[in-house]
Image (cartoon, helix red, strand yellow):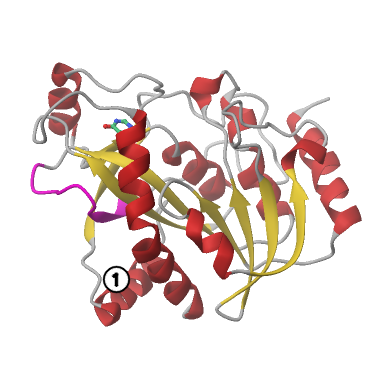
Amino acid sequence: MDVYEKLSRATEYIRSITDFVPETAITLGSGLGGLANMIEETASVPYGDIPDFPVSTVAGHNGRFVFGHLSGKKVVAMQGRVHYYEGYTMQEVVMPTRICKMLGAKNLILSNAAGGLDLSFEVGDLMMITDHISTLVPSPLIGKNVEALGVRFPDMSEVYSRELCNKLRKTANELGTPLKEGVYLQVTGPNYETPAEIEMMRRMGGSAVGMSTAVEAMAAAHAGMKVLGVSLITDVPGKDIGPLTHEEVTRVANEATEKLSRLISETVKNM
Ligand code: HPA
């Protein structure tokens, strides 16, 4: 079965549960988990029930699609995502994003936890993603092109929609929420970076480094979706003290969830 057949079968399964057509898809990455509680839910579909769907290997993170209204707008939230470092192919990693498009979503909002490369960043900062560097990870578009979604050689000159970025900037300003901006650089993980790697990534032009978002944004841009991305800076390697742990990243992400969830729900209102 090719990628498109798998996508179609998974989409058909979801359609057998709900006919809800979302306008905006939202990936609830670290720091945005709290947004799930703000959605007036009409239906939900556990990932594990969907044929060929990639399910997180992290315990207690199985995940589901949540359909409903957020700030009066029709959304589908992806509660839980899979990462390349879990052993999935990049095509599998972007399957949820592509299914959102096939369900009708025109916009995609991505969130993640990331390490700050820009030394002016502080732990707990929010960074709007204005562009990305995905060169260090395999493209999710490698393999037979899914013609139904997009072209073989897609343009990537505006992956992050200027229009949506302006809406996020305006909303952050109205809420008085400080918002940094910068370039997200993706690595495979699961290991964090060495000091020499961090220095290289700074020189390459990255503002923040993480293990998830650029490939999802690429798959969405390939399919013609408007993308908005926010990184929550959970650590600034070389600036704060001591070795980095997943527990520390999670702790900072959980602390910021209310601030980020409010910013996103208010932005969705204006979309
Ligand atoms: N590096 C890579 N991914 C991350 C980091 C980091 O420092 N922090 C949170 N996710």
Magenta range: 119-132
Residue 189 at x, y percent in the picture: 39, 22
Can residue 107 be seen here? The reply is: no
Q: Nearer the viewer, residue 182 or 156?
A: 182
Q: Nearer the viewer, residue 136 or 123?
A: 123
Residue 206 appears left or right of 134 = left
Quick check: 79 above or below 24?
A: above
Residue at x-position 38% and y-position 69%: 263
Residue 122 at x, y percent in the picture: 15, 49
Can residue 237 be seen here? The reply is: yes
Residue 58 at x, y percent in the picture: 56, 28
Label 1 is placed on what type of residue?
A: Arg
Task: Tell me if mark 1 has few (under 14), some (14-19) or many (20+) residues whose alpha carbon lies within 10 angstroms of its own.
Answer: some
Quick check: 111 above or below 186?
A: below
Quadrant position of residue 71: bottom right
Q: Is residue 172 magenta?
A: no
How many marks do you count on the picture?
A: 1
State the quadrant of the N terminus.
top right
Residue at x-position 27% and y-position 56%: 126
Residue 84 appears left or right of 131 = right
Q: Say which element carries label 1.
A: helix
Residue at x-position 61% and y-position 35%: 60
